Image: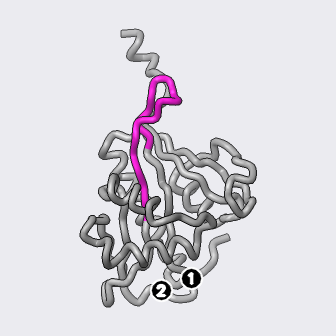
Amino acid sequence: MEVARATELPRKPRYFQYKHAFEKNYLPAIRALISKDLSEPYSIYVYRYFLYQWAHLCYMALDPVDNSLMGVIICKLEHHASHSPPTHRGYIAMLAVSSTFRGHGIATALVKMAIDAMAERHADEIVLETEETNIPAMRLYERLGFLRSKKLHRYYLNGNSAYRLVLLLKPTEPDVSQQLE
């Protein structure tokens, strides 16, 4: 059953791809938002690791009136050699939306932007982990086509377990019809 929204957003967020020039103004807000909502404590170096190398895969939702941060997604894309053949794997490391703005599609928009950016860069799959108790996140990702691939017992520092979710963007099995030609 869908829960009715109490109020609509007074204004639509503006979405921006993260740029290195944003660090001074937005990195403190990104850290504050993520540390409030995610169970893992990340140092500034973790944020910089992602944002410096994969800024083109990270997006922010900003309030159009005061440019305050409403939501953020931080991702990366690398070759992953544990598969045979190796895959080009996208990874959603962090997603957070301010509690004031949840339930209005901001997280969905941010995830779709990240998926599109990784698909444009030829990702074979996109993976992430989320706490098994985070039902809204599980619903969001599963609604967008992610599948539970593995349960990770006591994965987080707080002792909670997680699910690894995978979105396959390209078939993993060879196309038999092409092999027959």
In this rendering, position of residue 166 left or right of residue 79 = right
Q: Residue furthest top?
A: 180
Q: Which residue is mark 2?
A: 8
The magenta stretch is: 73-89
Q: Nearer the viewer, residue 74 or 118?
A: 74
Residue on which the image places disc 1:
5
Q: How far is the residue under mark 2 from the one under mark 1?
A: 7 Å
Crowding near the residue tagged with mark 2, few <14, some 14–19, many ≥20 C-alpha atoms within 10 Å = few
Does 80 lie within the magenta span? yes
Q: Given contact means CB atoms under 8 Å apart, are the residues at marks 2 and 1 in contact?
A: yes
**Residue 158 in picture, x, y percent from top left:** 71, 63
Whether residue 113 is visible here, answered yes or no, is: no
Q: Secondary structure at mark 1?
A: loop
Residue 135, percent across and down?
67, 64
From the viewer's perspective, is 155 left or right of 129?
Answer: right
The residue under label 2 is which amino acid type?
A: Glu
Q: Is residue 56 left or right of residue 133?
A: left
**Residue pictured at 37% horizontal, 70% vertical:** 60
Can you tell which mark lies on residue 136?
Answer: none
Instruction: In the rendered view, tell whether residue 137 sits above or below residue 63.
Output: above
Q: Residue at x 41, y 50 (%)?
A: 76
Q: Position of residue 80 (x, y in %)?
A: 46, 35
Q: Is residue 56 magenta?
A: no
Against 106, residue 88 (above or below) is above
Residue 68 falls in image quadrant:
bottom left
Image quadrant containing the N terminus: bottom right
Q: Nearer the viewer, residue 87 or 51?
A: 51
Tell me which amino acid carries mark 1: Arg
